[in-house]
Amino acid sequence: MSSSVLYDVPGPRARSVNVLLAVLFVLVLGGAAWWVLDTMHDEGQLAADKWKPFVTDGRVWTTFLLPGLWATVKAALLAIVIALPLGAVLGIARMSDHSWVRVPAGAVVEFFRAIPVLILMIFANEAYARFTDVEPDNRPLYAVVTALVLYNASVLAEVVRAGVQALPRGQTDAALAVGMRKSQLMLYVLLPQAVTAMLPAILSQLVVIVKDTALGGAVLGYSELMRSAGLINANYANLIASLTVVAVIYIVLNYLITSFAHWLEARIRRGKRTTGAVLTMEPHEQTEAGQPTLPTVKALEPPHDRPGDRPGDQPNDQGQT
Amino acid sequence: MFDFLDLERYDLFGAFWMTVQLTVFSAIGSLVWGTALVAMRVSPVPVMRAFGTAYVNIIRNIPLTVIIIACAQGLYFTLRVDMGSDDQSTAYFRLAVLGLSAYTATFVCEALRSGINTVPMGQAEAARAMGLSFVQVLWLIVLPQAFRSSVAPLTNVLIALTKNTTVAAAISVAEAALLMKEMIENEAQTLVIGLLFASGFVLLTLPTGLVLGWVAKRVAVKR
């Protein structure tokens, strides 16, 4: 349901009420913003020397922000690259015809999705310290990646399962009819098609991973982007400014990934060579430490479907999205 | 095997009780703020719509850890917002709830928005035909139905919130993850401690999912 249906085209009275509401809202918002800026000013957080280093002092970027960003990206990429095949194996195992494969795989997936990533990180960090000879310097990275892999492989296993199940039944029937084995059916027919349908969902999961790497910085001391805010603060005593800059970098990075996912999704939906099935993670499903849901399956809709039949892209923002 | 579990020294139940408290207060906060956000996002006033959209898109893309740390170090230390408490640990608890609510509200907003989309157009049209105003249409007709079909996605948000409360460990709120870190560093039984806390969270999230899943089926509007 498009939300413009919630109200009529405003007449003269509704228009004046709307203008009044808009003015009131802007006043409240402006008041809040003024209070924040005023408090910041009182505490000296708006002083030019707190913000100038980000423009004038290149070392802020070369010593802190860029290495931090690289550490974040490195951990996130490692996590998704390792989690993908693992997730595929778990997802396929969960669809197995043999219960001795299906049940343990299901148990693993449900277990790792039910516990917080931070618990996994703390555990992995300690386990590496006690049982392996990983150098202490590398330990946080190992722990962060291990925890993210365990958690996200479980999430991706569900994505793979949903992706395969979204394919038309005829694909399986046809493959079996030409005499393929079950393994051939999965490897040559189902998975390649499911992967294209899954790409947007995988990218959405990448956003979650990028955000979760910050946990490693806060609790394990992994020197990623968020931790570099603390380091900049130690040098320039500009906590609010450095946290703001770091937050903006995260927003831009995640916005780029999300936009790419949307673009890809639209492209796949238009594509002639696929079944037109797309898996998306609706925004409310991609919560930071995840949740046990199947990703939404947009299967078998005609390729030229109407804009606005998905919650994500309906016109209720009236051109503002 | 469990002799490390010195409950005098490690307040296990207190820590999980703190997790529950963080979850409950943040759930209430995010539900209220998320409902307000979704009302803004579908409202006829363009400025409110723009604010709602911008808020959701910005806050959702910031790691929760950054938000929580900004609440503690930015709001408390730098701007001296103490949330009406002289005691630092109480203030940190309240700030953690504030951060969790602000973050989770974006997901509540999206869940409710997808719930609003399941309400047939005719419902709102009929309401408008009877002369109901926007607020009446939203509050009396659309939102009650939207809430009922949003129970399932909201359950997922609640479960994610339960797990996200561990992030409060980053600002030393004495909840489960912080205690786990302390215990696992001091005691030898790494695996047992890991399993203990993991099962604690399974015990918290599993019944939530089962009960609310049942509720979701009961209350969903059959169409």
Image (spheres, rainbow, N blue to C red):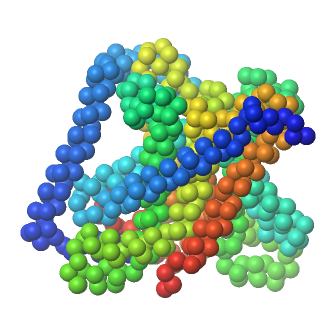
Residue A239 lies, in percent from the top left, at: 44, 23
Query: Does any portion of residue A159 appear in the rendered image?
Result: no
Where is residue B72 drawn, in percent x and y?
Answer: 48, 31
Query: Residue B8, located in which quarter of the rendered image?
Result: top right
- Residue farthest to the left, as pictured: A12
User: For this view, does A98 lie left or right of residue B211?
Assistant: right
Residue B113 shows up from this direction = yes
Residue at 50% of width from left, 54% of height from top? B27
Q: Position of residue B85 (x, y in %)?
A: 43, 32
Q: Nearer the viewer, residue A217 or B140?
A: B140
Location of residue A321 with respect to A307 vertically, above or below: above
Query: Residue at 65% across / 73% down in the picture?
Result: A166
Depth check: A206 or B28 in front? B28
Q: Does residue A90 appear left or right of residue A241 in this picture?
A: right
Q: Which residue: 34% across, 77% down?
A: B141
Viewer-proximal residue among B157 and A106: B157
Quadrant containing the N terminus of chain B is top right
Check the image and report above or below for A128 versus A111. above
Residue at coordinates 71% horizontally, 82% vertically from top-left? Answer: A170
